[in-house]
Image (tube, rainbow, N blue to C red):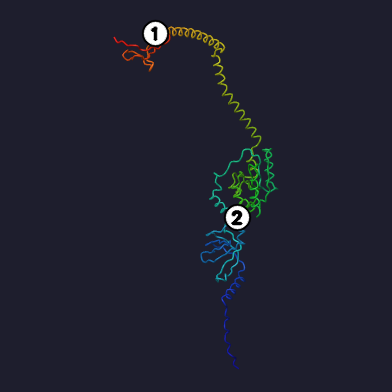
């Protein structure tokens, strides 16, 4: 008996959405999580805060995205050309039917993430001038009060307090306790620096902690801490870790100390050194004064030997004044007599020329009563005209009876 011929089943028809869903399911099944190394290109950050870029090598490339929830913990900022190691999963962006790598973690290849973040922040702040020596201020010589920003317990704060008390016992110290490591530490340090800046008695601030790994010291590489130190109106000394540890806070601060103990020694003088300096200065001033006064004293003594007794000089001057007074009196008397004799002669001559002297010899002066003019010509008179006769003694009024002209 012949079997019926079996025809192949017709293929199922899939929608585009169904097809992309199946591809996504296969990818999720076989590539749930993988590690990929590649180079970043076309890096961009929209306002959403997500990172979008292309991950490529010499032979291929794939779009990649790192969502904001993952970027928040990233200590460095990705850049084009950076070679990175990524972990994540491959998925299908169904809206465009495109493969996409969804990144969960990112590490720079060949360089730690923290070191890269340190180098990036260092370059950026240096370009802004926050490390420039010109903006850094000198420390006060003898501060009234010192603010310390550090952990409340530990060797660092104990070493600083012991050093300050030994070097300058009377100084007032304000310890502002903070967390010095962990994600909350940068905010604590910024708030402490700002609080101390609001206290008028604080003259200098020490910010620091003991040594540790790069991760332990990372709070002092935070940009917020760096900008708080740069904005401080009070000079800041950074004392983070050991001598070999260099942080961003060290570079921004007005002064860097190798250790917290060294920071305490920098901000106050040692009272014994200061006393010794005062003694040396006093001795130097005394010697200088003696060298300056000695020759001058000898000069005064020499001049004194040449000086006469001022009382003798005064007696001589008084005698001289008496002599000059007598001579002046005689001269004035003789001068007055001569002037009187000369005045008498001038008076006699003036009297001889005076018309009054003429009148005394029997003459008179004739004036017209009408206008007071002196009469010199008889022809100018008329009969009956009144005349005034000025005599040596008294006056007379006369009327013209007649005139004669010879």
Identify the element where label 1 is drawn: helix
Relative horizontal placement of residue 358, taking residue 193 as reference (left or right): left
Q: Position of residue 280 (x, y in %)?
A: 62, 30
**Residue 219 appears in the picture as rendered:** yes
The answer to whether residue 186 is above or below residue 389 is below
Relative horizontal placement of residue 248, taking residue 341 as reference (left or right): right
The numbered disc on residue 359 is 1
Viewport quadrant of the N terminus = bottom right
Identify the element where label 2 is drawn: helix
Q: Position of residue 380 (x, y in %)?
A: 32, 15
Q: Position of residue 75 (x, y in %)?
A: 60, 56
Please name the residue that numbered disc 2 is placed on: 114
Relative horizontal placement of residue 406, taking residue 312 as reference (left or right): left
Q: Residues within 10 Å of mark 1 (few under 14, many from 20)?
A: some
Relative horizontal placement of residue 356, taking residue 307 as reference (left or right): left
Residue furthest left as drawn: 406
Residue furthest top as drawn: 361
Residue furthest right as drawn: 153
The residues tagged by marks 2 and 1 sit, at their Cα atoms, a distance apart of 138 Å
**Residue 182 appears in the picture as rendered:** no
Q: Residue at x 38, y 6 (%)?
A: 362
The numbered disc on residue 14 is none
The answer to whether residue 68 is above or below residue 369 is below
Q: Position of residue 327 (x, y in %)?
A: 49, 8
Of the pair 341 and 238, the residue shown nearer to us: 341
Q: Mark 2 against mark 1, which lies toward the viewer? A: 1
Tally the numbered discs.
2
Labels 2 and 1: the sequence-earlier one = 2
- In terms of image quadrants, where is residue 37? bottom right
Q: Residues within 10 Å of mark 2 (few under 14, many from 20)?
A: some
Of the pair 280 and 183, the residue shown nearer to us: 183
């Amino acid at each position: 008996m012949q079997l019926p011929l079996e025809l192949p089943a017709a293929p199922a028809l899939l929608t585009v959405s169904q097809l992309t869903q199946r591809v996504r399911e296969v990818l999720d099944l076989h590539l749930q999580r993988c590690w990929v190394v590649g180079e970043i290109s076309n890096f961009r950050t929209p306002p959403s805060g997500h990172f979008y870029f292309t991950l490529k090598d010499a032979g291929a490339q794939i779009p990649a995205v790192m969502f904001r929830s993952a970027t928040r913990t990233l200590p460095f900022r990705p850049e084009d050309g950076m070679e990175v190691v990524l972990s994540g999963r491959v998925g299908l962006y169904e809206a465009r039917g495109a493969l996409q790598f969804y990144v969960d973690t990112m590490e720079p290849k060949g360089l730690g993430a923290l070191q890269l973040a340190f180098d990036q922040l260092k370059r950026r702040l240096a370009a802004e001038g926050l490390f420039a020596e010109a903006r850094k201020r000198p420390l006060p010589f003898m501060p009234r009060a010192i603010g310390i920003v550090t952990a409340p317990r530990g060797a660092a704060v104990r070493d600083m307090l012991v050093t300050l008390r030994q070097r300058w016992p009377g100084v007032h110290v304000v310890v502002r306790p903070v967390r010095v490591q962990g994600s909350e530490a940068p905010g604590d340090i910024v708030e402490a620096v700002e609080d101390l800046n609001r206290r008028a008695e604080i003259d200098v601030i020490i910010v620091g902690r003991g040594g540790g790994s790069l991760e332990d010291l990372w709070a002092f590489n935070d940009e917020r801490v760096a900008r708080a130190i740069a904005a401080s109106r009070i000079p800041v000394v950074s004392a983070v870790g050991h001598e070999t540890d260099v942080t961003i806070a060290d570079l921004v601060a007005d002064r860097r100390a190798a250790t917290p103990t060294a920071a305490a020694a920098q901000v106050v003088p040692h009272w014994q050194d200061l006393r010794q300096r005062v003694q040396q200065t006093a001795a130097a001033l005394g010697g200088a004064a003696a060298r300056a006064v000695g020759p001058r004293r000898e000069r005064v003594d020499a001049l004194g030997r040449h000086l006469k007794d001022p009382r003798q000089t005064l007696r001589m001057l008084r005698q001289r004044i008496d002599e000059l007074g007598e001579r002046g009196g005689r001269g004035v008397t003789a001068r007055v007599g001569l002037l009187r004799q000369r005045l008498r002669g001038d008076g006699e001559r003036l009297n001889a020329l005076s018309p009054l002297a003429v009148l005394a010899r029997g003459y008179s002066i004739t004036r017209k009563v009408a206008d007071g003019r002196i009469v010199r010509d008889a022809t100018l008179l008329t009969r009956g005209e009144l005349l005034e006769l000025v005599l040596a003694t008294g006056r007379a009024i006369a009327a013209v009876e007649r005139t004669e002209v010879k």
